[in-house]
Amino acid sequence: MAAWKITNKFMCNLDLVCGRYAISKLPEELIEEFEISAGHTGKVLPADWNISPTKEIYIIRNNQEEKRELVNLSWGLIAPWSKTSDEAIKSQSSAINARTETVDSKPTFKNAFKYHRCLIPATGYYEWATELGKYPSKQPFYIHNKNNKTLAFAGIYSTWRDENGAAKQSAALITRPAVDILEKIHHRMPTFLPQDRWDHWLDNQENDVEEIKSLLHFNNEAAGLIADP
């Protein structure tokens, strides 16, 4: 477990779910696992057990031909009203997560939710226990699939242009109220999408907000997950 141990200097805000996650898979592994037909665009990222806001990450989305592609962008959705690069970077730290309850209405997220959805692959993620009296202060947990299968976070992405017209793409993951074993650690958790919902979620032609939101709710959301202290 030493590979994923992190220290308190990397602590996330206890009110902010999933402020750190990990991905150790190579692009070719993700291409096979997520049935990506359009390949990978971007550089190969090293295995990272402490992905933090604004870092470069992988996402899976449909291209204009509705074929899945693996692309690189930065974590934390840039506020669409940002006027400078400095403003854009500052806005990312507060927009790494969007809530299922408000993702379709908050100005930062609603357009991306309607038109630009993605999957964010993760080997696992970190959460700090908040159940008072049960765990030591600031007790971190590493949450992952018991079979080591890659997690698929529901995500959204957008393209922002800086003052020189250069495009910068960014993404946020979607969270929901925690269930099962995960609610003992934190009151929220990432939204995991099962494979049978990937096609519908990534479909660029699906713009019915209520239909899209229905994809985020299903039974056994935390099935097969392990939380290691």
Image (cartoon, rainbow, N blue to C red):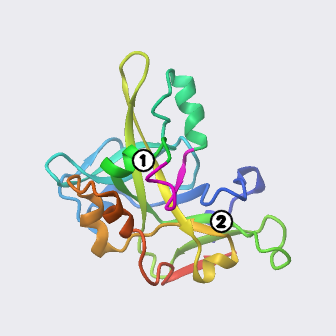
Q: Nearer the viewer, mark 2 or mark 1?
A: 1
Residue 34 can be seen, yes or no: no
Q: Residue at (69%, 78%) from the top-left corner?
A: 184
CA–CA distance in space, label 2 to label 1: 26 Å
Residue 165 location in percent, x, y? 36, 19
Looking at this view, is 88 or 145 the one in front? 88
Q: Tell me whether circle 2 and circle 1 mark residues in contact (CB < 8 Å).
A: no
Residue 149 location in percent, x, y? 41, 74
Give the main secondary structure of the magenta stretch.
Answer: loop
Q: Residue at (53%, 59%) from the top-left corner?
A: 22
Residue 142 location in percent, x, y? 62, 70
Q: Is residue 183 above or below residue 34?
A: below
Residue 82 can be seen, yes or no: yes
Which is nearer the N-term, disc 2 or disc 1? 1
Residue on which the image places disc 1: 110
Q: Is residue 61 above or below residue 30?
A: above
- What amino acid type is highlighted by mark number 1? Lys
Mark 1: few, some, or many residues within 10 Å (few <14, many ≥20)? some
Residue on which the image places disc 2: 127
Task: Tell me the element at label 2.
Answer: strand
- What amino acid type is highlighted by mark number 2? Glu
Q: Quadrant of the N terminus?
A: bottom right
Q: Is residue 101 above or below residue 46?
A: below
Question: Is residue 96 in the magenta section?
Answer: yes
Dividing the picture into quarters, in which one does residue 210 lie?
Answer: bottom left
Residue 220 location in percent, x, y? 46, 84
Task: Tell me the element at label 1.
Answer: helix
Residue extent of the magenta highlight:
95-105
Farthest left residue in view: 65
Q: Quadrant of the C terminus?
A: bottom right
Mark 2: few, some, or many residues within 10 Å (few <14, many ≥20)? many
